[in-house]
Image (tube, rainbow, N blue to C red):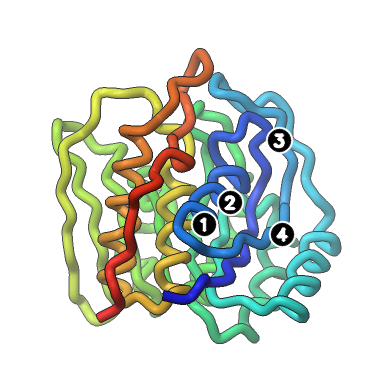
Amino acid sequence: MKSPRILIIAGSDSGGGAGIQADIKTVTMLGGHAMTAITAITAQNTLGVHEVMLVPTDMVVAQMDAVVSDIGVDAVKIGMIGSAETAHRVADRLEHLSVPIVFDPVMVATSGSTLADEATIGAFERLMHVASVVTPNLPELETLGGEAAILRHGCHLVAKGGHAEGWEIVDRLLSPGGRSRELRGKRFDTSETHGTGCTLASALACGLGAGLSIDKAFEQAVRFVRIAILEAPGLGQGAGPLGQQFVTDFQWEDPE
């Protein structure tokens, strides 16, 4: 398989557990080349987000233009977008790219800190319109209006089940034509889950950028996240980071 070029548009997590840092680790461990357009800088650790400084929209777009014009892109992953203005400008740029786009509609950090205001969440409509796949957790799914509201944009939907109750986690892939698929797995008794959403979306983008079908990319992204949870290094006093860097024996299956 080729080494996919993945453009990551997201915020920075100074604690290294989520955001750009988790994205880079994931894409690198999966054999991709990670490129970044950083939307925000956060002072953050396993206990929470202490400060947020947004990167000016012009700089976010300049980062995108720099890598697209020179290196090229096979897939895009969008995480924390920062502001409504940045969401609209990013959508304007992405409308001209014919590559898979994975949008993780980040609203709240694992610690509970708010990462998107109402205006920014309202601008998510533009990003869902250009996205190939949207990957909300259950609270985000509800805020965005539910499954039908997202699928109306013509994208696939990965509804993550980690926020549900029970011993089993059910992750679902829904397609615009009504097709659906479920992956079920045992819930791990751990708090080392900081960055799971970022990791899943980046792994999904990496698989799609490498030429995998949506079904195969979904299956393997979920598998990578589960292994990374088991390999978590146990850092910090709160919600600890995953162990993407320790998933050394992961092998992509060949595209169908």
Q: CA distance from mark 1 to mark 2?
A: 5 Å
**Residue 41 vertical position relative to residue 82 in the rendered view, above or below:** above
Q: Secondary structure at mark 3?
A: strand
Q: Position of residue 4 (x, y in %)?
A: 52, 72
Q: Secondary structure at mark 2?
A: helix
Give the amino acid at mark 4. Ala
**Residue 59 vertical position relative to residue 169 in the rendered view, above or below:** below
Labels 4, 1: front one: 1
**Residue that carries the numbered disc 3 in the rendered image:** 42
Q: CB under 8 Å between callouts 1 and 2?
A: yes
Q: CB under 8 Å between callouts 4 and 3?
A: no
Q: Secondary structure at mark 4?
A: strand
Labels 3, 2: front one: 2
In the rendered image, which quarter is residue 17 located in? top right
Q: Is residue 9 left or right of residue 201?
A: right
Q: Position of residue 103 (x, y in %)?
A: 50, 62
**Residue that carries the numbered disc 2 in the rendered image:** 24
Q: How many marks?
A: 4
Give the amino acid at mark 3. Thr
Q: Tell which of 14 and 52 is nearer to you.
A: 14
Q: CA distance from mark 2 to mark 4?
A: 12 Å
Q: CB under 8 Å between callouts 2 and 4?
A: no
- Looking at the image, is mark 4 or mark 1 earlier in the sequence? 1
**Residue that carries the numbered disc 1 in the rendered image:** 27
Rendered residue at 42%/42% (across/down)? 196
Q: Is residue 141 left or right of residue 72?
A: left
In the rendering, which numbered label is found on residue 37? Answer: 4
